[in-house]
Amino acid sequence: MLRALFLLLATAAPLSGHAAAGTGSGDKPTPPCSPADRAALLGFKAGITVDTTGILATWAGDDCCGGGWEGVACAAATGRVVSLRLQSQPGRYMNGTISPSIGGLEFLESLVVRDMGRIGGVIPDALSRLVRLQQLYLEGNALAGGVPGKVLSRMTSLRYLSLAGNRLEGRLPRELGDVRGLQQINLAGNRLTGGIPSSYGSLSSLEYLDMSSNLLSGVVPEFLGRFKNLALLDLSNNSFSGEMPASLGGLRHLADLSLSHNKIAGRIPPQIGSLRSLSSLALDDNLLVGPIPKSLFGLPKLWRLDLSKNKLTSALPDFAGGGSLKWLDVSRNAIGGQIPSSISKLGDLERLDISRNRVGGVIPATMAAMASLEWLDLSSNAIVGRIPDNFTGMTGVRHASFRGNKLCGRIPQAPPFNRFPAAAYAHNLCLCGKPLPPCRKIS
């Protein structure tokens, strides 16, 4: 949700003092676009071999400002093109390359070519001429080559950068650290390698950093903790190693933190429990060890906590807080102890997965008070006793699994528990009742 909101605000922000294509202020019509701008746009059009979006078909006539050229916006006072925003719809695309002629749009402040799917080739060096550019979104295409550090370093006005969802390769360019006004960097979904350059420590204005789903490695830099305005940090689906830096605990505006699917080892720093703005924390599929910091369950805005597929040990902490949690996944660890009865305090919890651990003891009957629960997985543990009878009141549960424990006794004989497949109760000691065979009558 945070990602979508940030991108929407960044790309929808109006350009100060500018009018949409073909409009002016007051009684004065917008001047016709300059011949140089028109030539640059037609050069871009010539580089596109197939256009199923229909956008470029509107680029006809002499006036690219007042002639209905879709995606083109001009300054009301000068008639110079200041915005070019081309976004595809599902199933539509453009095939071709980005023409170097785009560099001729010298007054351009926003360039968006998004989700065209088949626009390939390299990002042209001519874009370095766009010194007024504030927004550059070339995401969801098939661009190849490297991230053009020298080109980007000349865009001193750049604030928002997204090259996500392309086929970019090579190392992160150190020159990107020279663009100190950057508020957003999104390079997710490419084939980038190596570590994060130390020069990026100068990007103190960053609010959004997404480098997920690449081939990056090395350690998570300590300097990320100096980005005091950072609201989103996503380094998931890479090969980062080393320990999780405690400095991240100083990011008081951080709302979304994902380091999942890496090789991060060591303990979860207790300083993470100081992130009072945190709403989503994903550290799953790493090599983390030790206990789960109790402070995580006191974060007032945290609704998603995924610590699955690690090597975390000790017992679950008592749930004195955590009232905002909707998603709690600690599956596939080495957690022992038993399920605390205080888990019922997680009244808003919708998904609970404790499977594939070493949890023993009984299932607390207090769990029946968790009225919002939709997904419950306690499988592959060492839980004893019976499934509490009062679970019949948990009518909103859509998936449950008690498989692979040491449970015995009658399964709650009411929907949904008597309608789950038999596999949900398999490999226990002596569970009985629908969907398993009936319980034996004691004579």
Image (cartoon, rainbow, N blue to C red):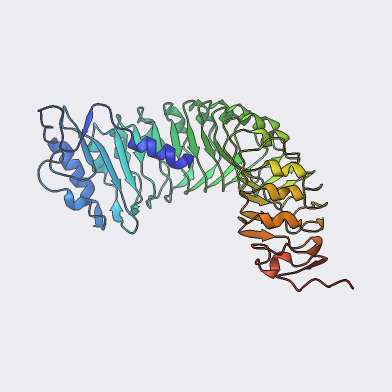
Image coords of residue 285 (percent x, y): 65, 49
Is 206 left, or right, of 226 in this rendering? Answer: left
The front one of 143 and 291 is 291
Can you see residue 139?
yes
The front one of 191 and 248 is 248
Is 119 left, or right, of 240 in this rendering? Answer: left
Can you see residue 150?
no
Image coords of residue 347 (percent x, y): 64, 43
Quarter of the view holding residue 218 = top right
Image coords of residue 207 (percent x, y): 48, 31
| Callout count | 0
Location of residue 135 with respect to 287 vertically, above or below: above
Seen at 13% across and 48% down, the residue is 60
Image coords of residue 80 (percent x, y): 18, 32
Location of residue 101 with respect to 383 vertically, above or below: above
Identify the residue at the far front of this view. Answer: 443
Location of residue 213 with respect to 178 vertically, above or below: below
The front one of 366 and 265 is 366
The front one of 248 and 101 is 248
Is 402 left, or right, of 285 in this rendering? Answer: right
Seen at 90% across and 73% down, the residue is 443
